[in-house]
Image (cartoon, rainbow, N blue to C red):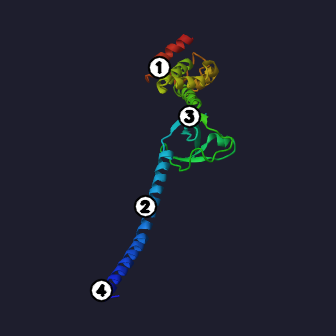
Amino acid sequence: MCETCETIMKHRSRRDESKAYNFSRLLRSIAPVNVYINTSTLVSNVFCCAVSLHNMALSTMRSQFLNESIYIVPSNEKPGCVYKFSVKKDTVYRCVRCRELGKQRCITVVDGVLTSQKSPDEGHHDKCVPLPESVVRAQQLDREMRAEVRNSGKRSRDAFSAMMSNVAKRFKSSSEQAEVIANLPSFGEVRRQLSRHRAVRYTPVPDLLDIPDVLRVTLRGRQVDIKEQSTVESFKD
């Protein structure tokens, strides 16, 4: 082989070695970057999905004691069904049904937003199933009616009529209205209970001619003076 051919072969071998080295170095430098980018993208996508699924604003309802201490959490596995979580302490809430069955299933709610990364459907008792949303909404309307009667002394019939009229305002579709109304109690079923709630707002007057001092102030804040009191006493005599 002549000198020229040897020179050409040396250059070719060096070029091939250089290509192989550069290619291997490129793999070592780029492959981890690709893996890192794919992993971070995957983690980012998973985190975004978790945020969209679990960082949701929740609605509240009154408990059996008529205070705002229950959050309504929609079910992801069963659309149209919800769970009820009552307050345990601070921002921790526990499933109402799981508590009845002897198990603690808790979530974290901050400023009305569910922050738990765990799905609301996981970790429940085997016999704990989500309730239809129409049943919970009907219970919510019923308890709001009771609270209004208890706090304002509104007449039972008027409060019941107002509750029925609110169904059309809150639920637009006729199917939702029909489902909620089907789960609402009748006036005869709640009349006595509403009367007991209304009685809390009133001071008993055993003797109509001996009015307590609490009732001597009118709705406008005007207090009964001594002359009117003497008139009442003269009428009593």
Task: Say whether disc 1 or disc 2 marks the residue closer to the N-terminus.
Answer: 2
The residue at 39%/79% (across/down) is 17
Q: Nearer the viewer, mark 4 or mark 3?
A: 4
Q: CA distance from mark 2 to mark 3?
A: 38 Å
Q: Which residue position holds label 1?
A: 226
Q: CA distance from mark 3 to mark 1?
A: 63 Å
Q: Quadrant of the N terminus?
A: bottom left
Q: Which residue position holds label 3?
A: 80
Q: Is residue 38 above or below residue 201?
A: below
The amino acid at mark 4 is Thr
The amino acid at mark 3 is Gly
Measured from the top left, where is residue 127 in percent x and y?
Answer: 68, 41
Q: Which mark is residue 37?
A: 2
Q: CA distance from mark 4 to mark 3?
A: 84 Å
The amino acid at mark 2 is Ile
Q: Which residue position holds label 4?
A: 4
